[in-house]
Amino acid sequence: MWQQVIVALIVVAALAHFCTKYLPAALRRQIVYVLSRRGYDQNKLAKLFNTKSSCGDGCSSCGSCDTTPSASSDAPTSAPLKRVIMLRVQR
């Protein structure tokens, strides 16, 4: 009897770990949205599922895209810097 309960707890923990790590981000956002509609805390679920808390529309912005950032006159207009990764070949 106790062995079955322990095995069931291990399987539930493995399923929860799989859901929080390996599911696609869109699916994790939907899970957070559905569970938050059921009354669970959205901020805690978003932290658990490694998503940002959102208003549920899927964009995770909650109105932040309504305003456009103003261009600063001090900012250079050159292309962004590219990162170069140096590799050492050992033979």
Image: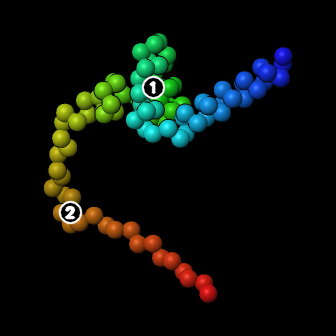
Left or right: residue 28 compared with residue 70: right
Q: Residue at position x 84%, y 18% from top?
A: 2
Q: Residue at position x 21%, y 66% from top?
A: 78
Would you call the spot at circle 2 few (<14 residues within 10 Å), some (14-19), or many (20 or more)?
Answer: few
Report which quarter residue 7 is drawn in. Answer: top right
Left or right: residue 80 compared with residue 44: left
Q: Position of residue 15 (x, y in %)?
A: 62, 31
Q: Position of residue 47 (x, y in %)?
A: 50, 31
Judging depth in this view, the residue of 17 and 2 nearest the camera is 2
Instruction: Report the residue marked by disc 2.
Output: 76
Marks 1 and 2, how far apart in space?
Answer: 40 Å
Label 1 or label 2, whichever comes before in sequence order: 1
Q: Is residue 73 above or below residue 64?
A: below
Residue at the outermost bottom position: 91
Q: Is residue 42 above or below residue 91?
A: above
Left or right: residue 9 compared with residue 63: right
Instruction: Report the residue marked by disc 1.
Output: 32
| Nearest-to-viewer mark from 1 and 2 | 1
Q: Is residue 16 above or below residue 22?
A: above
The quadrant of the picture occupied by the C terminus is bottom right
Q: Position of residue 23 (x, y in %)?
A: 50, 38
Amino acid type at circle 2 is Pro
